[in-house]
Image (cartoon, rainbow, N blue to C red):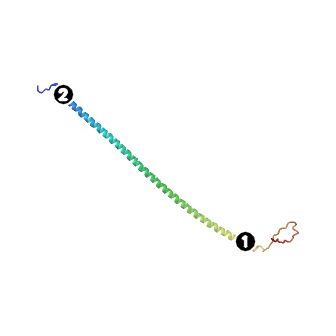
């Protein structure tokens, strides 16, 4: 019966095996907890880094958008200025043309009036008149004597 171990020895060996398994499981559990904590920490750091990169990207996009907006505003202002200048040139050109037409028409009318006056002067008799003031009966005209001052 050398092959049989006493029951107490078998139980003790099983107990030692179980204790070593428990110790190994406790050690594995501790290692897994540490690994879990490390992974949680890595996850948190990565999430913070992602959030930071998103903020940086948003700021960059915001600055690019503001730059594009300023560029468009400058282009718009330049177009408005160009249109204003073009309009002012057209208005000035139109006014100059209008002034020239009016001046030509005025000169034509002035020449026509001079011709009309010359024609009238030639047709009318040459009369010298003196206008006097007389109050009373027009049949009794008294000769006018100029006053001296």
Could you say where residue 58 lies in the image, as x and y percent from the top left?
A: 41, 48
Could you say where residue 135 lies in the image, as x and y percent from the top left?
A: 85, 66
Horizontal placement of 121 versus 70: left or right?
right
The C terminus lies in quadrant: bottom right
Res. 12 mark: 2
Could you say where residue 46 lies in the image, as x and y percent from the top left?
A: 34, 44
Res. 117 mark: 1
Q: Residues within 10 Å of mark 1 (few under 14, many from 20)?
A: few
Disc 2 secondary structure class: helix
Q: Nearer the viewer, residue 3 or 18?
A: 18
Disc 1 secondary structure class: helix
The N terminus lies in quadrant: top left
Could you say where residue 110 lies in the image, as x and y percent from the top left?
A: 68, 69
CA–CA distance between discs 1 and 2? 153 Å
Q: Nearer the viewer, residue 124 or 79?
A: 79
Residue at 56% over, 61% down: 88
Q: Is residue 39 above or below residue 67?
A: above
First along the sequence among labels 1 and 2? 2
Residue at 31% over, 38% down: 37
């Amino acid at each position: 019966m050398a092959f049989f171990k006493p029951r107490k020895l078998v139980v003790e060996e099983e107990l030692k095996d179980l204790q070593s398994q428990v110790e190994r499981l406790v050690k594995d559990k501790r290692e897994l907890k540490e690994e879990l904590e490390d992974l949680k920490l890595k996850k948190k750091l990565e999430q913070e880094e992602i959030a930071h990169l998103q903020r940086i990207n948003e700021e960059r996009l915001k600055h690019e958008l503001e730059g594009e907006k300023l560029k468009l505003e400058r282009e718009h202002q330049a177009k408005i200025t160009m249109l204003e200048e073009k309009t002012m040139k057209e208005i000035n050109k139109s006014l100059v043309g209008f002034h020239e037409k009016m001046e030509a028409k005025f000169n034509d009318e002035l020449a026509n009036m001079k011709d009309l006056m010359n024609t009238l002067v030639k047709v009318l008799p040459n009369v010298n008149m003196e206008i006097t003031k007389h109050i009373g009966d027009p049949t009794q005209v008294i000769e006018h004597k100029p006053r001296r001052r």
